[in-house]
Amino acid sequence: MAADRLPHEKGFHVSWDQLHRDARALAWRLDGRGPEGKWRAVVAITRGGMAPAMIVARELDIRTVDTISVKSYDHQTQADTKVLKTPDAELMGDGTGILVVDDLVDSGKTLEVVRELYPNAHFATVYAKPKGEAMVDTFITGVSQDTWIFFPWDMALQYVEPYRGRD
Ligand SMILES: O=P(O)(O)OC[C@H]1O[C@H](OP(=O)(O)OP(=O)(O)O)[C@H](O)[C@@H]1O
Ligand code: HPA
Ligand SMILES: [Mg+2]
């Protein structure tokens, strides 16, 4: 779908540098907030949660990292939310002491499904839209519901016409 025909009114384009800063800020906010001050593991919701989860795990010196694979969007269209792969059951338990990380929460559907599996985990995202805020325990930046967030892994540097050359 062409960028000028997207269903969202606004675009929020996040660079690698910005994502790194925001994911670091998320880690610092979560530091020492696990049960007895410690998180047992970080679990990334693939695929978008993987880069933020790596940054959080690095900042907090957490070496146990697992993944849960959830798919809910085909491009910008929401489809049925499906869990394709679960993390290690012994590690997870009911989620106590586990930090589940995703890039963003939008409708909240993805986190709702993961929360049902691990009700005692802590859910953290870098960005959050209002509809999904109730599903996330900690986030860094709020964006409006009509904004589409473009992540650095979905973008490329490209030439832009000078302002006076664009009609
Ligand atoms: O709050 P929701 O409305 O459920 O939307 C948020 C989820 O949607 C995106 O993942 P997507 O399913 O597109 O897969 P991906 O991470 O592999 O790109 C995003 O990375 C979140 O995981
Ligand atoms: O705003 C978004 N950006 C990228 N992926 C998404 N998945 C749901 N909402 C979004
Ligand atoms: Mg995702």
Image (cartoon, helix red, strand yellow):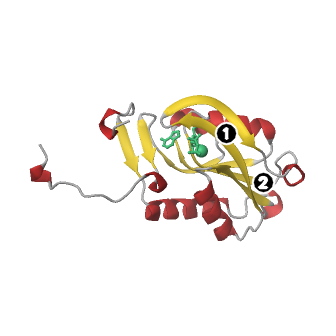
Q: Would you say 18 lies left or right of 83 here?
A: left
Q: Would you say 48 lies left or right of 119 here?
A: left
Residue holding disc 1: 111
List the single residue furthest toward the left: 164
Residue holding disc 2: 98
Q: Is residue 104 visible?
A: yes
Residue 87 in picture, x, y percent from top left: 79, 50
> How many marks do you count on the picture?
2
> Residue, x 78% and y 54% (percent of image)?
98
Quadrant containing the C terminus in the rendered view? top left
Give the Cα separation between the discs numbered 2 and 1. Answer: 14 Å
Residue type at numbered disc 2: Ile
Residue type at numbered disc 1: Leu
Closer to us: 60 or 46: 46
Residue 123 in picture, x, y percent from top left: 69, 47
Helix, strand, or loop for circle 1?
helix
Mark 1 Cβ and ligand 1 under 8 Å apart: yes
* Residue 146 to residue 62: above or below: above
> Residue, x 39% and y 30% (percent of image)?
7
> Residue, x 78% and y 64% (percent of image)?
64
Other residues around mark 2 within 10 Å, as few (<14) / some (14–19) / many (≥20) = many
Q: In which quadrant of the rendered view does residue 116 lie?
A: top right
Residue 20 in picture, x, y percent from top left: 51, 64
> Residue, x 34% and y 38% (percent of image)?
2
Q: In which quadrant of the rendered view does residue 24 lie?
A: bottom right
2 or 1: tag closer to the N-terminus: 2
